[in-house]
Amino acid sequence: MKHVGTVRAGVLAALGTVLATGPMTAFGHGESLRGGGSGSINAVGAAIVEQPVISLRWDARRYETFTDQQMVQFRVQGEDVHMHSSEDAYFLTVAFPFGEDNDISIMTQYNSFKGFKDNGDDAAIACFDPDGDGVVENADTACISPTAKSAGFGDTLLTWRHRFYNDGESQWSSVFGVIIPTGKITNLTDRGEVLGTHNQPGSGAIIFQGGVAFSGHLTEKIAIDADVLYRVPSEGAKEFRSGKSWQLDVAAAFNHHSTLIPVVELNGIFADPDVENDQIKKNSGGDVVYLSPGINFRINKGQSLYANFSYPIYQELGGISNDEKYRWSLGWAANLGG
């Protein structure tokens, strides 16, 4: 089963040269091809924080949805399809340096997903096919299983960056991360069944990520952050495993020494299909490229606000999947060192 999907993953969204206050971190739920709740989509950057930083962030995603009649027709065709219409995720991150060329961030999250419909859980199947012979005998929209909400604390992301090159103009860092399965995985549908793993606030899986990040300048007034990340999930709850994925990002900040800083990003997520019970999920995986303009507002030397809007300019999702319509983000970061 798959709605639109992101690979469950999180990334350190360090603004580096863009924000003097340091990183904001984001993490996605795991169904949208965005790298989270999957890790959202912000460029990591290589500039190491110089003092401890705390940040808060809200990510909101909205999706196209299928009609009830389409969901019934998918069932008639033997397609097991679910969807939900919205995802809201709230993140708390603390980042701190150790040594001159290293920093660590710890991110925790609360996830809320709403507007579920499923044509393939046990309750729906029992309604569509009462005698269990595999043939739909009751093509009624009332058989579709609705669920209003799945909410709870999600998994915890730990990220370590090591800066291995810095010539005063350009910086390069290696990025290592692990997602620890601390999130809730026991939410029920409105008809009393356990929701699929990819609809839970947590994953039940350990996910490793690694890559390389860059920070530098295109011109004196244009700062650049970029990264390439690769993610490898372990098996999570109910024998579900998200597909391996690549994430590529580049962000440009204009007049980055000013108070109000325009930012534009290109972000790509390229994901293999998911696996459940040792079977490839055909309605999963795919490729998405996002265009994400935003604004950073420097309140003072120690605090800043961040907002952006993300639009998928290219989506090629696997099988029957709902397109993501858009995402917006709001964030605040403060330097704990004053």
Image: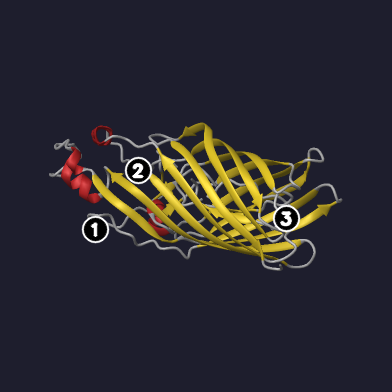
Density class for disc 2 (Cα within 10 Å; few <14, some 14-19, many ≥20) is: many
**Which amino acid is tagged 2?**
Met
- Residue 23, given in percent of the width and then of the height, sits at 65, 56
Q: Label 2, label 1: how many angstroms apart (C-alpha)? A: 17 Å
**Which amino acid is tagged 1?**
Gly
Q: Return the residue at label 1.
A: 192
Q: Return the residue at label 3.
A: 20
Relative to the observer, which residue lies in front, 19 or 61? 19
**Callout 3: helix, strand or loop?**
loop
Relative to the observer, which residue lies in front, 336 or 52? 336
Asked if labels 1 and 3 touch by Cβ distance under 8 angstroms, the answer is no
Density class for disc 3 (Cα within 10 Å; few <14, some 14-19, many ≥20) is: many
Task: Tell me which numbered mark, 2 or 1, is placed earlier along the sequence.
Answer: 2
**Callout 1: helix, strand or loop?**
loop
**Which amino acid is tagged 3?**
Ala
Q: Return the residue at label 2.
A: 83
Task: Tell me which numbered mark, 2 or 3, is placed earlier along the sequence.
Answer: 3
- Location of residue 94 with respect to 197 vertically, above or below: below
Pick the quarter of the image with the C terminus. bottom right
Density class for disc 1 (Cα within 10 Å; few <14, some 14-19, many ≥20) is: few
- Residue 267, given in percent of the width and then of the height, sits at 60, 40
Pick the quarter of the image with the N terminus. top left
Task: Tell me which numbered mark, 3 or 1, is placed earlier along the sequence.
Answer: 3
Image quadrant assignment for residue 335: bottom right
Q: Residue 251: in sight, yes or no?
A: yes
Q: Residue 39: in sight, yes or no?
A: no
Give the foreground label among 2 and 3: 3
- Location of residue 151 with respect to 145 vertically, above or below: below
